[in-house]
Amino acid sequence: MNDEKATYGTGNSTMLLIGERTFDPAPFDAISFDLCSRRKDVVIMSADLSTYCQVNRVKAELPEQHLDVGMAEQNLISVAAGVAKAGLVPVATTFACYATRRAYDQMMICMGTGPNTSIVVGFTPGIANPARIHHQAAEDLGMVRAIPNATVIDPVDPTDFRQALDVAVDLPGLVYLRGHRGDTPRILDPEKFSFELGRTYMLREGTGIGIVATGHGTQWALEASDLLAARGLSHSLLHVPTIKPVNEAEIVEFAYAHDRIVTVENHQIVTGLGSLVTEIVSDIGGGPRITRLGLPNTWAPGGTLPYIRTELGLDGEGLANRIEGLRT
């Protein structure tokens, strides 16, 4: 797992990518069951959404490590904080919109102000949810990033997700992860990728335009990268799974090595990855221009993920065209 060529900015960066991509139909079901089988102090918690967050095996086969508080997300977070104070490791699961917008105060005060490990996994973030505004958590990363000492992680695929959760259960304080459910593409090679908190990962290496992406945005950026490569446009792609705390030196090294930076994220362009990269570069000054691509600061439409992406110019073709257009 600790292949030296897999570190940031060295070796053949494409080696982190899996050869033939397949889809995992229920990543968290296997991830949570495996974790609970190894760690008897972990409790997977639900708010009447265990089926929709794909917490089935733990609920059926390890019932002593599953706790459902009913359809009450604020209660979910408060009870999870109490479970943490009892010496266990709670992993509270719900939709990202409920975890952040509906239970933000409980997350901040009950979980964020103490040293006990408290994990929240927010599923269907951003436009990954087919419903409209009330289910689209387009601002969750920024909200939790504002909580002092919180950890914020946006994995790209099941490999990233699994390894990040393994790290999270040993971190102090509040940890917020965006979760994957349903047909999730396997992108990273589990034999070569090793998640480390704060670390960034070069997936494509080139010159000119540098693309920085996270979570679903990294999936989308890879689609655009394939098209850009076919068009002969040299570029780099950096995956940033940790939004907080991030290795700022790696962001700086990448940014200042390129003429132009583009950020891609399944999040509002306000307060998310694009804001993070802009803040880091502006603190130094004199860096490349930064273009933030993601959900605009307007309400997104509802519908299937491919439909919404196309409407917002976040499909592979749309992203490739927008990035290529920045050369002029």
Image: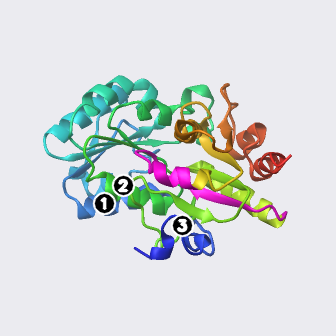
Contact (Cβ within 8 Å) of mark 1 with mark 2: yes
Q: Nearer the viewer, residue 309 or 168?
A: 168
Which kind of residue does numbered mark 1 sit on? Leu
Which kind of residue does numbered mark 3 sit on? Leu
Q: CA distance from mark 1 to mark 2?
A: 9 Å
Q: Nearer the viewer, residue 197 or 77?
A: 197
Q: Nearer the viewer, mark 1 or mark 2?
A: 2
Residue at image mark 3: 188
Residue found at the far front of this picture: 286
Residue at image mark 2: 165
Is residue 25 visible in this depiction of the protein?
no
Residue found at the far left of this picture: 86
What SS does tag 1 mark? helix
121 displayed left or right of 14: left
Res. 226 mark: none
The image position of residue 113, as x and y in percent, is: 25, 30
Residue at 78% across, 52% down: 320
Contact (Cβ within 8 Å) of mark 3 with mark 1: no
Is residue 233 visible in this depiction of the protein?
yes
Q: Upstream in the sequence, badge 1 or badge 2?
A: 1
Does the magenta segment cover residue 252?
A: yes
Q: Nearer the viewer, mark 3 or mark 1?
A: 3
Bin the neighbour count of mark 3 within 10 Å (Cα to Cα): few under 14, some 14-19, many 20 and up. Answer: many
Q: Upstream in the sequence, badge 3 or badge 2?
A: 2
Quarter containing the N terminus: bottom left
In the image, the segment drawn in magenta is 231-253
